[in-house]
């Protein structure tokens, strides 16, 4: 359970700005002892992530380099190279991502993304490419995206289509996205829909995000997360997240979404150092409606330019 919680904690970890930052994480073992876990660093157009191997040695997991090739008022081209490593520190893969964005004076934009990946012999080949079209009208942004991948016969075909809208006001941001994939007959049908609304009022941020997925031709609610962020008088930020779903590991399935977990992240800043602690609580096995006590399962410290 604690390893899973650490992975979740990493998902809500810090975003980095342009200057360098260093991240160090901690987890708690079955005896409640605080165990350091190497994190990563970023800055200077690159980043690195690390783990501890079975012998206690620090080994790289992923390293990335990013270069801005073109940056004008109407065009931006960014190239990113990601190298992945096994637990012994040996490089096992390379991914090259090229993003080309063009903007028009009216706010419309086109983004072309090409992803190349290495095979077992180190040769680079096309893995995926996508084209995103964005339009802006007043407070509403609409977009469509087509994702293509190579087929076995060497051609490239569209495997996924996305469409959505984002509406922004002074206090709210509303999103509605539909993802279409091919069915067994090759037709594009609605596979996933995600609806989200974020409200900022009186120093608090409330975000409600719901995901629907299609099962046997019927769109059903799969997962819902409700996040509330507030800043205390001393500058501490508290993020509470409630997760609802039909099923959860180690818990019986339910006829409808049930509260499966609550997470609490407390973020405190002192000078150039920011510390986050993660605590979780889940329903008891005997009573799915009764939540246990919060248990701290992780901690992360960022030094430098952190959000």
Image (spheres, grey):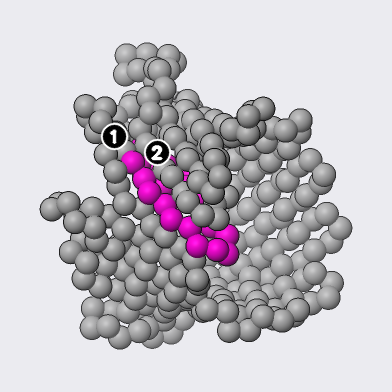
Q: Which mark is residue 299?
A: 2
Residue 163, quarter of the rendered image:
bottom right
Looking at the image, which is closer to me, 288 or 25?
25
Image position, residue 21 (x, y; %): 48, 58
Q: Which mark is residue 34?
A: 1
Find numbered disc 1 in the image and state the secondary structure of the residue it sits on: strand
Looking at the image, the residue that sits furthest to the left is: 55
**Do the residues under discs 1 and 2 have CB atoms within 8 angstroms?**
yes
* Residue appearing at x 31%, y 18% in the figure: 285
Does the stretch in magenta take in 229? no
* Residue appearing at x 25%, y 73% in the figure: 91
Above-or-below relation of 260 to 146: above
Looking at the image, which is closer to me, 259 or 189?
259
CA separation in Å, label 1 and label 2: 9 Å
Find numbered disc 2 in the image and state the secondary structure of the residue it sits on: strand
Q: Which mark is residue 189?
A: none
Other-residue count near label 2 (Cα within 10 Å), few / some / many at <14 / 14–19 / ≥20: many
Q: Which span of residues is magenta-colored?
A: 4-26
* Residue appearing at x 36%, y 60% in the figure: 49
Residue 236, quarter of the rendered image:
top right
Q: Which of marks 2 and 1 precedes in the sequence? A: 1
Q: Is residue 68 left or right of residue 109?
A: left
Note whether residue 147 is visible: yes
* Residue appearing at x 31%, y 51% in the figure: 38
Looking at the image, the residue that sits furthest to the right is: 138
Does the stretch in magenta take in 12? yes
Other-residue count near label 1 (Cα within 10 Å), few / some / many at <14 / 14–19 / ≥20: some
Q: Is residue 282 left or right of residue 68?
A: left
């Amino acid at each position: 359970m604690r390893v899973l919680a650490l992975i979740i904690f990493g998902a809500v970890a810090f975003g980095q700005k342009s200057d360098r930052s260093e991240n160090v994480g901690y987890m708690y073992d079955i005896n409640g002892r605080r165990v350091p876990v190497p994190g990563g660093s970023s800055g200077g157009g690159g980043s690195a992530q690390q783990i501890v191997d079975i012998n206690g040695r620090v080994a790289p997991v992923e390293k990335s380099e990013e270069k801005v090739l073109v940056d004008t008022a109407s065009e931006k081209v960014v190239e990113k190279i990601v190298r992945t490593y096994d637990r012994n520190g040996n490089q096992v893969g390379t991914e090259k991502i090229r993003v080309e964005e063009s903007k028009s004076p009216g706010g419309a934009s086109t983004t072309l993304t090409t992803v190349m990946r290495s095979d077992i012999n180190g040769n680079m080949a096309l893995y995926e490419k996508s084209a995103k079209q964005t339009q802006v009208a007043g407070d509403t942004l609409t977009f469509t995206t087509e994702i293509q991948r190579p087929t076995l016969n060497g051609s490239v075909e569209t495997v996924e289509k996305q469409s959505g809208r984002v509406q922004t006001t002074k206090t709210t941001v509303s999103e509605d996205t539909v993802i279409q994939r091919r069915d067994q007959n090759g037709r594009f049908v609605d596979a996933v829909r995600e609806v989200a609304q974020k409200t900022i009022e009186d120093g608090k941020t409330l975000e409600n995000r719901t995901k629907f997925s299609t099962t046997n031709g019927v769109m059903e609610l799969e997962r819902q997360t409700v996040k509330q962020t507030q800043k205390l008088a001393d500058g501490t930020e508290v993020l509470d997240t409630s997760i609802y779903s039909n099923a959860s590991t180690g818990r019986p399935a339910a006829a409808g979404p049930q509260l499966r977990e609550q997470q609490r992240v407390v973020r405190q800043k002192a000078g150039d150092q920011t510390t986050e602690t993660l605590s979780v609580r889940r329903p008891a096995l005997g009573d799915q409606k009764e939540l246990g006590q919060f248990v701290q399962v992780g901690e992360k410290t960022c030094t430098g330019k952190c959000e």
